[in-house]
Image (spheres, rainbow, N blue to C red):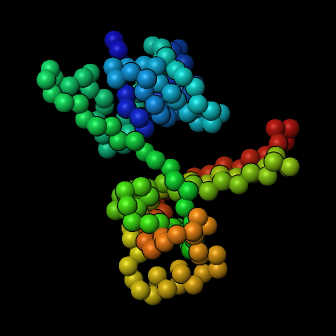
Amino acid sequence: MTMHAQPGDRLVVENPVTGVTRRDGEIGRLHHDDGPPYEVRWWDANEIALVFPGPDARVRPVLGREAPAKGPPAGAPAAAPVVPAARPVDYAASDDDVFFRTAPGPTTAGAVGSDAAFEVDHVDEATSRGRSVLEVGRADAVGAPEMLRRLQERPHSEPWAGGARPLWARVALTRLTGRRIAPADR
């Protein structure tokens, strides 16, 4: 049986005896339309590897999408894949919300009106310490004039990349996860 997946799906590899997850990652690039190999970013090591899944692996589709079909009916067009994208943005945090500014258009502004993930990482290579925080929530455009004024008056609110970034969006926290990075000997 051929395994089918789309970019953004999860690949989970389990111990065939215990059913315990051994590896978990996100499928990035497909090398063939009809199945493996897949480029997978393994979450435990944050590395990308070319994977030919074995019988102990299964695909978990992106939330909100049905399990991958075995293929479209003869003569039917295949659906265009949805590719999640990560983009650097200028941001501000306030209480349980994160605000970011962007330019109108399909890239980052495309997240407005849908669920979005916002991640901030910091690594100090000299001390081998760091942290990574991931917030998930709905991204909505900020339209209230008073809130827009407060965001624009914050220190360091000008875009680092320059150019016009007139759209401010708010990601309302629904889930927060994170991890601390410490030297291996502690």
With 74 as the anchor, is 177 left or right in this view?
A: right
Using the image, determine if residue 118 lies above or below residue 60.
below
For the residue pair 135 and 32, the one nearer the viewer reads as 32
Residue 96 in sight in this render: no
The picture quadrant where one finds residue 82 is: top left
Using the image, determine if residue 89 lies above or below residue 23.
below
Q: Quadrant of the N terminus?
A: top left
The residue at the point 58 percent across, 64 percent down is: 161
- Of all residues, the one furthest to the front in this rendering is 163
Residue 128 in sight in this render: yes
Where residue 9 appears, as percent x and y from the top left, is: 41, 34
Q: Quadrant of the C terminus?
A: top right
The picture quadrant where one finds residue 15 is: top right
Using the image, determine if residue 7 lies above or below residue 2.
below
The residue at the point 45 percent across, 88 percent down is: 146
- Of all residues, the one furthest to the left in this rendering is 75
The residue at the point 74 percent across, 47 percent down is: 181
Where residue 137 appears, as percent x and y from the top left, is: 44, 59
For the residue pair 122 and 55, the one nearer the viewer reads as 122
For the residue pair 93 and 164, the one nearer the viewer reads as 164
The residue at the point 14 percent across, 20 percent down is: 74
With 21 as the anchor, is 108 left or right in this view?
A: left
